């Protein structure tokens, strides 16, 4: 039996991940204005892509619910 979370849970996770990514980018990433922002911004982008792919592939998009 497949115990992957449903569509609503996946959308909530992606929404929260997007909010966290935007907040971190404005603090220490590309939007911070410091010279360290480029390195940290690339690291955050790679981390965001890995986490987003994990949520996308770990969610049963045809089942509604949590």
Image (spheres, rainbow, N blue to C red):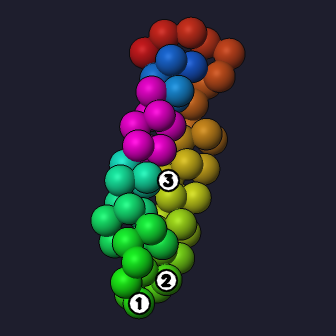
Secondary structure type for disc 3: helix
User: Which comes sooner in the sequence, label 2 or label 3?
Assistant: 2
- Is residue 3 shown to the viewer in this render? no
Numbered range of the magenta stretch:
12-19
Q: Which of 57 and 21 is in front in this view?
A: 21
Would you name the residue on which mark 3 appears?
51
Would you name the residue on which mark 2 appears?
38
Q: Which of 55 and 35 is in front in this view?
A: 35
Image location of residue 14, percent across then percent down: 50, 37
Left or right: 42, with 25 as reference point: right
Q: Nearer the viewer, residue 45 or 66?
A: 45
Residue at (48% x, 10% y) in the render: 65
CB atoms at circles 2 and 1 under 8 Å apart? Answer: yes
Q: How far apart are marks 2 and 1 (CA)?
A: 6 Å
Would you name the residue on which mark 1 appears?
35
Quadrant into which the C terminus falls: top left
Instruction: Give the dominant element type of the magenta stretch: helix, strand or loop.
Output: helix
Residue at (46% x, 85% y) in the render: 39
The residue lying furthest to the bottom in this view is: 35
- Is residue 42 shown to the viewer in this render? yes
């Amino acid at each position: 039996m497949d115990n992957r979370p449903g569509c609503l849970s996946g959308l909530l996770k992606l929404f929260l991940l997007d909010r966290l990514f935007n907040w971190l980018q404005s603090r220490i990433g590309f939007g911070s204005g410091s010279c360290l922002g480029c390195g940290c911004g690339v690291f955050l982008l790679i981390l965001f892509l890995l986490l987003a792919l994990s949520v996308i592939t770990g969610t049963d998009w045809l089942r509604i619910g949590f």
